[in-house]
Image (cartoon, helix red, strand yellow):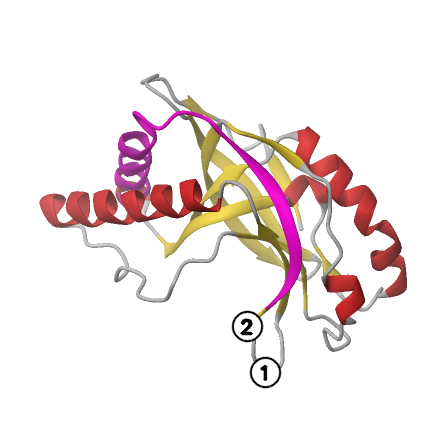
Amino acid sequence: MRTFVALELPPEFTRPLYDALVISQERYPGFRWTRKENYHITLAFLGELDDRGVSLLEEAVQETVQNTEPFSIEAGNIIRLPPRGSPRVIALDIEKGKNEIRLLAARFEEILAAIGEKEGCPFRKPETRPYTPHLTLARKGGTALEFPRDERNWSIRAHGMIRKVTVYKSELYREGPRYTALAVFPLGNSTESLHTSPGDKTFRG
């Protein structure tokens, strides 16, 4: 199954963000806008994994979140990815909390590689591209992602606490991706994780 690891965003962050983007969504209906319930910050995309791979992935996430306390984040400006050339994604940059997210992602990559080597179950090659914490707002759809600078540089007042890391299954459909939470891990010293059934937390793109 296609899997990725992401930070869950609290309602106090996603609600004002969505409200601030309503006018832009109406102005640019040709963009493939991310649904509010699908907002997340990806730590790592793993691609296709079998059941054993998913189990080892969850083990890596569990080890990653230990001794990492919840931290606060604040929204930054709207950015285009890639930053040069024709953009494929419009995203929200993270201002406060960016360093904490980068450290968490780097620690996860190290632990994942070590577990894969130990168990003889290597994952995809470690990422070599610089990691940019961001929240995808829209992807290229029926129209090009032309987004005026004055709409990209305004500030969004959204902030909240990051308390959980989630392992997701991603399924692709014509109407958009569907994300299903497989396991949720609280940040901190708790050793408990919440494994969900397929119907517990499924979001459509």
**Is residue 50 positioned above or below 13 on the image?**
below
Quadrant of the image occupied by residue 179:
top right
Name the one closer to the observer, 157 or 46. 157
Q: Residues within 10 Å of mark 2 (few under 14, many from 20)?
A: few
Residue drawn at the location 39% of the way across and 48% of the way down: 102
Q: At 68% from the left edge and 39% from the top edge, which residue is drawn?
A: 37
Q: Is residue 15 magenta?
A: no
Percent across and percent down for residue 202 are 60, 37
In the image, residue 163 above or below residue 144: above
Q: Is residue 2 visible?
A: no
| Closer to us: 41 or 53 | 41
- Asked which quadrant contains residue 100, the reply is top left
The residue under the point 73% across, 51% down is: 155
Q: Please, what secondary structure does the residue beneath circle 1 have?
A: loop
Q: Which residue is mark 1?
A: 85
Residue 82: mark in rendering: 2
Residue that lies at the very extreme toward the bottom in this rendered image: 85
Give the extent of the magenta segment.
53-80
Q: Is residue 27 left or right of residue 34?
A: right
Residue 153 percent across, percent down from the top left: 72, 61
In percent of width and height, residue 183 lies at 43, 31
Of residues 122 and 98, the one nearer the viewer is 98
